[in-house]
Image (spheres, rainbow, N blue to C red):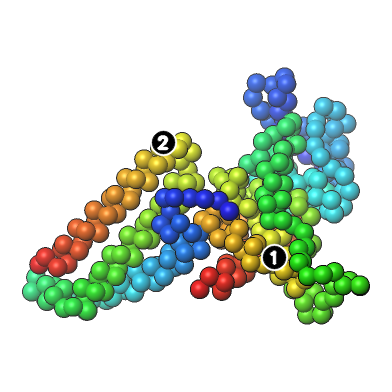
């Protein structure tokens, strides 16, 4: 057993499962947004704002935001442990990545409910 | 015309400041030799050339090396399989420390093998005769027990290159599943618990280099998938 403290779920199994579930959620969200844009070629501010004012769309969007946050954490954590061999550099990069993900997530929530 | 151009990795840490490639012209007399035979012919030209070999028939796993960019056993790889434009490039197995020329230090590889406890563990009292298996239970070990630990798979795996101290690697994981799948082994839970961290199993990204190079035609990626299934079944 190899110990680790900066990975998303502290367990390879839970990270692995989370990576797959979040990927499926992101795939659904991407397909939905692309299809919505294709079927609404004359999209204006009111239609777009109307879409995001509905509760189900806010939940779906928040789910996608949380998924991308978890997905990015797990994926980038893996990249740093593969390629950054200096502990100082690796911990620094991991801290920056996790903080950035936190900022983006809170910012996303503010945009979703702020309008 | 039948002279084969061979470029081989040379490094003697006691005399060389850096590794270099040495060029050989080998007269194969037009025969489709095995790569190991070519190494023997080269050793006749330069007796200082160091490489491992033993059974010369693909059973012992001593002569794993990188031939024109692909890992394999030199003794069972015919020139016609690897030579392109009459040129053969031989390098030691990638990712392991070089002791001399084609000889690598397999310490990390064996350490990972040792870590998965490659022996049968059973806490029930030993019966008067052998612990019996049904033919179906025995069938589950096919494709697992044949591994000869030549390290061709693990040293072709980037995940093992980057984290050889933490990622068990395809060879070790194939053997790990060999004991997880064994109906006579009772340490399944302990074995699974020691594998659920982000490195030991889960550093595998499924690129299947291991499957592509295995000289025995085994499939470590499938075994790793089975370990993941067992971990998931046990923890959810």
- For disc 2, the chain is A
- x%, y% of residue B74? 79, 47
Q: Which residue is mark 2?
A: A88
- Report the number of discs: 2
Cα separation between marks 1 and 2: 38 Å
Viewed as shown, does residue B25 lie left or right of A24?
Answer: right
On screen, residue A68 versus residue B219, left or right, reads left
Q: Quadrant of residue B101?
A: top right
Please tell me which residue lies in front, A40 or B161.
B161
Q: Residue at the spot x=79%, y=45% of the render?
A: B63
Q: Which residue is mark 1?
A: B187
Q: Can the viewer see residue B101?
A: yes
Q: Residues within 10 Å of mark 2 (few under 14, many from 20)?
A: few
Q: Quadrant of residue B144?
A: bottom right
Front residue of B224 and B86: B224
Residue B200 spot, x, y in % from top left: 58, 55
Q: Identify the element where label 1 is drawn.
A: loop
From the viewer's perspective, is the residue at label 1 or at label 2 nearer?
1
């Amino acid at each position: 057993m190899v110990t680790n403290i900066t990975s998303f779920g502290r367990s390879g199994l839970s990270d692995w499962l989370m990576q797959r579930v979040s990927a499926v959620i992101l795939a659904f969200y991407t397909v939905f947004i692309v299809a919505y844009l294709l079927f609404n070629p004359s999209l204006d501010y009111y239609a777009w704002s109307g879409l995001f004012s509905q509760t189900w769309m806010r939940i779906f969007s928040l789910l996608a935001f949380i998924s991308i946050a978890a997905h990015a954490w797990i994926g980038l954590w893996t990249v740093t442990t593969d390629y950054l061999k200096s502990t100082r550099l690796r911990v620094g990069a991991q801290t920056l990545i996790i903080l950035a993900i936190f900022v983006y997530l809170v910012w996303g929530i503010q945009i979703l409910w702020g309008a | 015309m039948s002279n084969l151009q061979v470029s081989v990795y040379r490094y003697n840490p006691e005399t060389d400041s850096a590794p270099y490639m040495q060029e050989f012209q080998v007269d194969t007399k037009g025969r489709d030799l095995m790569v190991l035979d070519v190494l023997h012919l080269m050793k006749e030209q330069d007796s200082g050339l160091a490489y491992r070999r033993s059974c010369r028939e693909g059973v012992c796993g001593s002569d794993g090396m990188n031939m024109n960019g692909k890992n394999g056993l030199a003794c069972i790889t015919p020139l016609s399989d690897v030579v392109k434009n009459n040129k053969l490039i031989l390098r030691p197995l990638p990712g392991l420390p070089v002791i001399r020329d084609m000889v690598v230090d397999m310490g990390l590889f064996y350490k990972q093998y040792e870590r998965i406890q490659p022996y049968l563990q059973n806490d029930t009292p030993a019966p008067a005769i052998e612990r019996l298996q049904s033919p179906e239970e025995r069938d589950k070990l096919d494709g697992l027990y044949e591994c000869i630990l030549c390290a061709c798979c693990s040293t072709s795996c980037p995940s093992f290159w980057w984290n050889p101290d933490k990622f068990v690697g395809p060879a070790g994981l194939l053997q790990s599943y060999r004991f997880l799948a064994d109906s006579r082994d009772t340490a399944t839970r302990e074995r699974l618990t020691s594998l659920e961290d982000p490195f030991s199993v889960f550093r595998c990204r499924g690129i299947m280099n291991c499957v592509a190079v295995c000289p025995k035609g085994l499939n470590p990626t499938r075994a790793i998938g089975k370990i993941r299934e067992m971990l998931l079944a046990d923890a959810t």
